[in-house]
Image (cartoon, grey):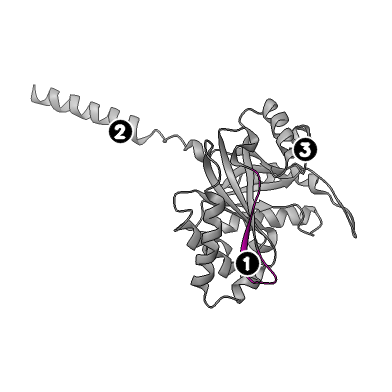
Amino acid sequence: MASLRVSIVRRLAALLWIVTGCTRPASPVADAPRLGQWVWTRADVARYAESAGVRPDLEAGVFIGAVHCDAASRKLVAHAGLPLSASGAAVVTAVIRFEDGLDRCRTATDSAHTFDASLDSVVSVLRSRGSGTRVAAVHLDFDAPQRALRAWAGSVRFLATHSLVRDSVWVTSLIAHLREPEYGDLFRGVVRGHVLQVFDTGEVVTGTQVHEAVRLATRARLPFRLGLGAFERSTRAGVTDHRAWFGAIARFAPIAEYRGIWIFPAGRSWISILGERS
């Protein structure tokens, strides 16, 4: 009888091992690749409504304001953007833009801590705007000069532990940023991830560049989303080819840290491009 009980216990233990040990837990929904559109202008609101009609899962990244350094006073100034509710989405990513020249205020300040505290103050004002719309994340959009990446990472850390302490914080990255071997180390543990912007970078799209971007995004070992432009513009070098990057989505998708894409429409329709080029 005792041997029978032992046999039953062993069988139950084996069954429990099969159920708990051999079954992989489902990946968190938050880590599944997502599709989002930035809403920068009223024209983008119309594009969001149009695209969300095709993709009900479409996320909205609403531009709520910008921070710049006033040239005369060398003080940080915040300018309001759209209300959080502009897209009509119940849950949004709040986007704060940091304009070129931000470091003029940094160098005019006595210490890094003083500058970061001042930056935190203006960000807090922008972050507090709006009600009735839940903020899923805050995207800090700054094309930081490469020489200032370490200082910018320090500022982001300050924001993430002060005014944005309750938020999931993302930052903009450029291919040029990822060429810095320490990029991942600078932001790992500070932000939830980065948005790799591949439009308006001044770099010509080539197969070699796509290969490099994939390699660098892999090396950074940070969750990321690909930031694509659905528009073209005329430059001194000719017409841009931003939309070519849509065809490269499949190259980034296998990377373990890939979390999806964001689209910058600049008022243009884009949902059909996604189907044609991705």
Which residue occupies the extreme front position in the image? 73
The verdict on residue 68 being magenta is no
Mark sitting on residue 277: 3
Q: Residue at x 54, y 70 (%)?
A: 115
Q: Residue at x 80, y 54 (%)?
A: 206
Query: Foreground residue, 132 or 256?
Result: 132
Which of the two discs, 2 and 1, sits closer to the camera?
A: 1
Q: Please provide the residue range marked out in magenta.
A: 69-82
Is residue 133 in view from this perspective? yes
The verdict on residue 78 being magenta is yes
Residue 7's place in the image compared with 259, above or below, is above
Mark sitting on residue 127: none
Residue picked out by circle 1: 180
- SS class, disc 1: loop
- SS class, disc 2: helix
Residue picked out by circle 2: 17
Query: Foreground residue, 174 or 27?
Result: 174
Three-letter amino acid code at the position of disc 1: Glu
Percent position (x, y) of residue 21?
Answer: 34, 36
